């Protein structure tokens, strides 16, 4: 599936202390059946939040002037990529900071919501608490990732 089929926007991140849960909207502008198939299990039911993972893989070093990377949603059961889209690293890291701040304000580990739409119509909504960040070589960047306390990777 082409990365340019997707648009990503975020809400509720101003100042990283907004008490509202940070929200990521991923809008798909391609053949609906293609995305629905990737977001479905073998019985054809849409995947639940606990059956998906969200990650960000850097393509550049964080020390570069404008580092970029790829946001990916994967099927946790099969490991298959559901979708991928290009995004600026600074925007993703700011979002992770907002999710942490939300957790501090809510006195928990934080979290965020992902809404995936097809041409503006909601397909799925996932409440997530983990967003793993990897460097360009595939190494986990723990300090940059959003990982709830008590979770061992």
Image: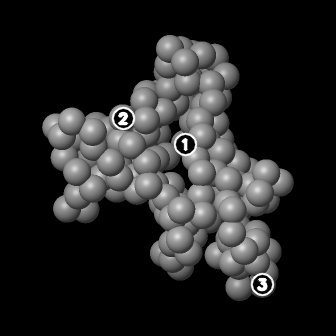
Task: Name the element at disc 1.
Answer: loop
Identify the image quadrant of the C terminus: bottom left
- The extreme right residue here reads 121
Identify the image quadrant of the N terminus: bottom right
Q: Quadrant of residue 65?
A: top left
Query: Spatial distance from mark 2 to mark 1, Cα to Cα?
Result: 19 Å
- Mark nearest the camera among 2 and 1 is 2
Residue under pointer 3: 43
> Which numbered disc, 2 or 1, marks the residue that appears first in the sequence?
2
Evaluate whether residue 114 shows in this view.
no
Tell me residue 145's x, y (percent): 37, 42
Apparent side of residue 40 relative to residue 112 in the rendered image (left or right): right
Task: Name the element at disc 2.
Answer: helix
- The answer to whether residue 37 is above or below residue 89 is below
Task: Name the element at disc 3.
Answer: loop
Whether tag 2 and tag 1 are in contact, CB under 8 A, the answer is: no
Tell me residue 124's x, y (percent): 75, 56
Whether tag 3 and tag 1 are in contact, CB under 8 A, the answer is: no
Residue under pointer 2: 90
> Which numbered disc, 3 or 1, marks the residue that appears first in the sequence?
3
Apparent side of residue 131 relative to residue 22 in the rendered image (left or right): left
Q: Which mark is residue 56?
A: none
Residue under pointer 1: 129
- At x 76% / y 78%, what residue is drawn? 33
- The extreme bottom residue here reads 42
> Which numbered disc, 2 or 3, marks the residue that appears first in the sequence?
3
- The answer to whether residue 21 is above or below residue 112 is above
């Amino acid at each position: 599936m082409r990365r340019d089929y997707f648009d990503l926007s975020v809400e509720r991140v101003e100042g990283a202390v907004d008490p509202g849960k940070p929200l990521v909207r991923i809008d798909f502008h391609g053949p609906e059946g293609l995305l629905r198939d990737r977001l479905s299990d073998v019985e054809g039911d849409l995947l639940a939040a606990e059956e998906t993972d969200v990650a960000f893989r850097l393509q550049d070093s964080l020390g570069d002037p404008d580092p970029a990377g790829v946001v990916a949603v994967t099927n946790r059961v099969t490991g298959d990529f559901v979708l991928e889209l290009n995004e600026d690293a600074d925007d993703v890291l700011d979002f992770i900071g907002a999710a942490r701040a939300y957790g501090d304000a809510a006195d928990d580990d934080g979290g965020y919501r992902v809404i995936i739409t097809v041409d503006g119509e909601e397909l799925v909504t996932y409440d997530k608490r983990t967003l793993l960040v990897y460097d360009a070589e595939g190494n986990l960047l723990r300090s940059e990732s959003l990982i709830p306390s008590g979770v061992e990777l």
